[in-house]
Structures are given as C-alpha cells and as structure tokens.
Amino acid sequence: MHFYRAHVLCCAGTGCTSSKSLDIISNFEKYIKENQLENEVKVIKTGCFGLCAEGPIVVVYPEGTMYVRVSPADVKEIVEEHLVKGRAVQRLLAGHDKTAEVSQSLDNIEFFTRQKRIALRNCGVINPECIDEYIARDGYSALAKVLTQMTPQQVIDEVTASNLRGRGGAGFPTGRKWQFAANSKGDIKYVCCNADEGDPGAFMDRSILEGDPHSVIEAMTIAGYAIGANHGLIYIRAEYPIAVQRLKIAIQQANEYGLLGENILGTGFSFDLQIRLGAGAFVCGEETALMTSIEGKRGEPRVRPPFPAVKGLFGKPTVLNNVETYANIPVIILKGAEWFNTIGTERSKGTKVFAVGGNIVNTGLVEIAMGTTLREIVYDIGGGIPNGKKFKAAQTGGPSGGCIPAEHLDTPIEYDTLTKLGSMMGSGGLIVLDEDNCMVDIAKFFLEFTVDESCGKCPPCRIGTKRMLELLEKITSGDGEDGDIEKLEELAKSISKSALCGLGQTAPNPVLSTLRYFRHEYEAHVYDKKCPAGVCKAMLHYHIIADKCIGCGLCARKCPTSAISGDKKQPHVIDQSKCIKCGVCMESCKFAAIYRG
Amino acid sequence: MKSIQELEEIRNRMRDQMATREKSGGYRIVVGMATCGIAAGARPVMRALIEELQKRNRNDVPVTMTGCIGVCRLEPIVEVIAADGSKTTYVKMDENKARRVVAEHIINGNVCVDLTIGAAEKQAKSKE
C-alpha cells in the first residue's frame, strides 16, 4: 500500500467533462511525473461537486483547496506552485473574482456549508470507478448488515419508519411501496430503478450515477432482499453516456467482488442487475410507461391500478424507485430511521437534491434539508441573481410543476407546501426567473415541451395540450382576445381531470400556477397588447424620444434593417414596419433616447 | 468475496489510503517548501516524513506544504501542529531528524526539544 501526501480530485461529471476536465486530469498526470511527484501525489477522477457554474473544479487534499474554472493550461502552474512549493494559486481559488474574501478550502464556502449531503455524500469525494473507495466510505456495509442481521420485514419496517418519500416527484412513501411488493405473491419479482431523468434542467440523478453508482446498486440489492426479488433493472436514458459507462463498470466490479450475483457474501441471497437503455422519451419516466418500454414495447403508460407492486414488469410484482431515493437507502439502514427522522420537517424527512439553474449565480447541484426556505437556496447557497436583477419566481417540478413567486420566498420547501402553492417537488429542477422573464412565455416553453413529448395515447393530453399551446401562442403574438384566459383555464382543468397518466394530468400546471400568481401579465398581453417583461417580440416596440435624440445617426448606422431614418442633428424615427426588434439601437444609443414599450 | 470479513478488510485498508481527504483530528505536519526551503533540502525531509508515517501506519496525519516562513537561514523548517492548534517549529531539518520527529513527537507525544527553533536560536546566541 502506498501513502500519498496529497490527493488531487478532478471532477469528471458531464458538466466538467464538457469543459475538458479529462484533459486536465491527463495534464496533472504529465506534470506530476515531470516534477517527480508521482509517489507523493495521487490524481483521482471523481463525480460532480455540484458547483457546475464554476467548473471544471479541482480540489487538492489534505488542504481541501478548491480551484474553479480550471483550464488544461492552468495545470502546470498548480503543479509547480501548489504541489511543489505548497503555495495555492490565488487566481484560481473559489471566490477569487469576487470582492469577498477568497476561500482556500471548500469547507468554508457557503455553497457547501449550507448543504446537508446524504444522497450526494460521495459525489466529489470518491472515485466512482473504484469500488474500494466506495467500500472505504462504508459502502456495502448496509447490504452486509441487512443480509446478516435483519429479516426482509425488518428492512421494510426500517425504511417505513424513516418516512422516506419518493424523490422522483410524486413523493409516495418508499417503505409502503416496498411493503406492497413484498406482500404480493409471485415466483419472480423485480426491482427497477428509474434513471430516466426527463425534466428540462434536472440532472441530479445523472450526477449521482456518475459520482456514486455503487450507492444505487447497493440500495437496489437491499430492496431485492426486502421484497424477495432476485432481478434488478436500471432504466437509464442513452443520452447519459458517462453515467451508463460508470454504472457498467460499477456493476462489473460488484459482480467480481461477489456483492452482486449468486450467493452474496456467502449468505445464500442472489441478485443480478442489468441496465436497460431508454431513448430519452419524457413519458418513459412515468412508471408504467417505463416498464412497458423495458418489456420492449412502445413506451406508453397504462391505467393504474393495478399498481406495479402488484402487477408490474412482465406482469410480476415490481418495486420501482428513483435514483435519488435509492441513494438514501444505505445511509438509512446504517444510521437508522431515527437519525433520518431528525432531518427535515414534520411531513417531509431527510434532504432533497435540487438542480439549480436559470438566472442565478451558482448554477449547480445542491442538497438541502427539507424545510430549508427558497430564499436560502436562491440567495445563500445560490449566490443570488446576477446583474442586480430582482427575483421574480422560481419554477420547480419541471413541466409538471409551477412557479413560486417572490412573496413565498420564505416558505419552507417540502412536498406538501410546494403542492399547496400550486407547484410540486418534482424530481428537483429549480429554475430561477428574474424580472426579465415573461411568465406567459415560460408557461409557453413548458407547454411546447409537453406537446413535443406527449406520447399520444390519450386525447386530453394529445389534443388538449396542443390547444392550450395554440392559445398561448396567440396571446404572446399579440392576438389574444377577451375570453382566451378563461378558455385556457377551462382546458387546463379538464386535462388535469381526464388525462391517463401523471404527466398528462400535471401538464397544465405551468399555466395554472402562472395564472394564479401572474394573471396580470396574461391580462396585459391580452388586453393591453403589452409584454411587461419585454420578452414577447410581437408586442415590443422601440421608440425614439425626440427631446433626447441629438441626431447623431449612430443607431441608424447600426440598424440591420435600415429601419431608422432622420436628418443630421434632427431627431430620428423608427419605421415600425421594418423594425425586427433586435434592440441594437437601444444598446448603441449614448443618450438613452430610445425606449422599449 | 466470500465473507463480510473480507469486506471489512478492504474497508480498513482503503480508509487509510483515503484519510488524506478526511479532516484529521490529531497532528498535522507542515513543511516549508518555498525556494529557500527546497534549496536547503526540504524535499528529502518531506519524503522521509511521509515514509516514516507510512511505516507506522499513521496515514491520518496530513503532511502539507507551506511557503516561506521568513527565517530562511533556518530552513528546512517543519512545523507540527497539534489538535488544539499549538505549534512546534523544528528547524534545520534533515532526513534523520525528520524520522526522529515522527517517532518521538507524532507517535509518542514527546517534543524533540533540541531540534526546535528555540534550541537553535539559543545555540546561535551562545556561539556569539
């Protein structure tokens, strides 16, 4: 065994990989060798740290020094300065570009200190392609405990007592789901993992699989033992190539170690695990559609009941949980339900991972205890909104969710409060919107997504969402009429009631919630033909204020369509029929003589 | 893998290797590695520290580097920082002294008084 005085951890999640983190790793190896440090310093490829906005990220231990936005060209300097001479490279430290003090260690960065990491406990800490590192962090101990010290019923009781609820969106109690499947009679049962993460902007499941694939494998094996299943399937979208690759490596390693397969740890329990690739259809994230897709058929949902726990994959009792739900299981088994109940709120226990995006400084992944307020996520962890803009709303739950306006910033985040506010937890996408976002346009964006992704099986979703989208397009192009808003509401309510699956039933949510909080914006579009945020181009007009215009002619020269005319030193005018509303004139005017309205 | 014992063996072995990434509760060793320190021979000192710690299975003690402390004439300098933050500064180190510090200070908790900055300064003064 060799002891290294320093460990260089380099993020190899999808985000950082796309900004050349693999080149960074190979450069580290090269320069470490050049400086004859290969016996002192170890380079480790790891999973997502969560601070994707600042990627690629490199952390040097034992100091825990966090370097951000590292490029392959910076590596030589880090090796020569930090690893050879022991001086941190100041210009690359987290926070170096802000006025606040520069933090040397990631333990002191607010982005991390405010988080409570359970599901992401190993992401950015271990090498996901090394089963030994997972084992070092108590990996597979929960499985060993379950197989040797607990009966299947005790496992289910522990999970039930933990009050863990499904992290995929609906929030169904996991223990109860397992109990139903355990009670179902059947010669063959299945354990499935839903890794078909489909919400736009959500990527926590991908990051868990990329950063800590063994946690999901271990949890699925535990679930198998609990319900009496010997087969497991992970349904993952093929557009997550790194996650698929790491899962394959992890399954192979677990098989080699005898932690999967026949007679696990000599206890007589057997469990095999396979991967099924999905083609990335949103509807396949719905549980019945997912199983239909695994069976080799067209991915369409079916009516429930019967629920999967009774009649699931290939007609057999099946437990289907989301990636993040599984990632919580080993910790619950090891630390106990009682410990898990100390985190979170009355009705939502534990933590939730959010993929924070949109108009926010620290785009990335955060895991917070349930009950944390939206304000803490947006301002304390997320670093607030860039360019001094005002917070308008946060969109949670993706196309099934809704918007939470500024007046509810202090609401604690948990399943029930979000539902009460007309949004939902969803899988954990959180998109921050500022004053420059038009809420009608946002609703239209999500409706476009749903219309694209509707599987077409039931008419309310197939036809209804399309009609809703047409109405929104009409409103945003300035052709809205009296009664359109009411029509939208009526359609939304009937789709919610009549669609076949959860996705269809929740598809109108983005419209309903924006109508609830931002009805005045809809009304401004319909009645005043104005887009208050200045997004909907059809309703935008640029005007020159004659008093302020000195007739310099700069805007006229910049205008790509020659829509501006006027004599020298005389106020100019914009020809609205030629104007394409690009806004170049307003940007170029030095006298603030042009306004948008 | 046939048994839970084997799983535990892997866990213990790997835990030691990963200790560098955990927060340490005990001693911490800092080696001055600026140009002055390196020129005076800080690198072999550090290697000796690491080897000695490894030999004694004390991988929980992190060895880190720092820049110039300012007393370049006393380099190589090694500081041992205890859990309570108290600091012992060893000066004019070499490989043998480094091994002694690990054995006497880190393992047995006895400060090598004769190697400290205080002893070196006293000696220098008596020479004058």
Image (spheres, rainbow, N blue to C red):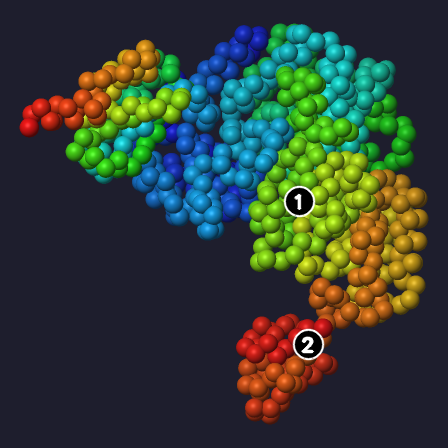
Residue depicted at 30% across the width and 19% down the height = B51
* A449 and A236: which is toward the camera: A449
Residue on which disc 1 sits: A375
Location of the N terminus of chain A by quadrant is top left
Chain ID for label 1? A
- Specify whether residue A239 is in view: no
Image label count: 2
> What kind of element bears circle 1?
helix
- Position of residue A157 relative to residue A557, above or below, is above
Q: Which mark is residue A542?
A: 2
Location of the C terminus of chain A by quadrant is bottom right
Which quadrant of the view contains residue A570?
A: bottom right
* A275 and A437: which is toward the camera: A437
Q: Position of residue A581 (x, y in %)?
A: 68, 73
Horizontal side of A114 relative to A282 (left or right) equals: left
Q: Amino acid at mark 2?
A: Tyr
Mark 1 and mark 2 on one chain:
yes
Which quadrant of the view contains residue A538?
A: bottom right
Residue depicted at 65% across the width and 56% down the height = A390
Residue depicted at 60% across the width and 35% down the height = A115
> What kind of element bears circle 2?
strand
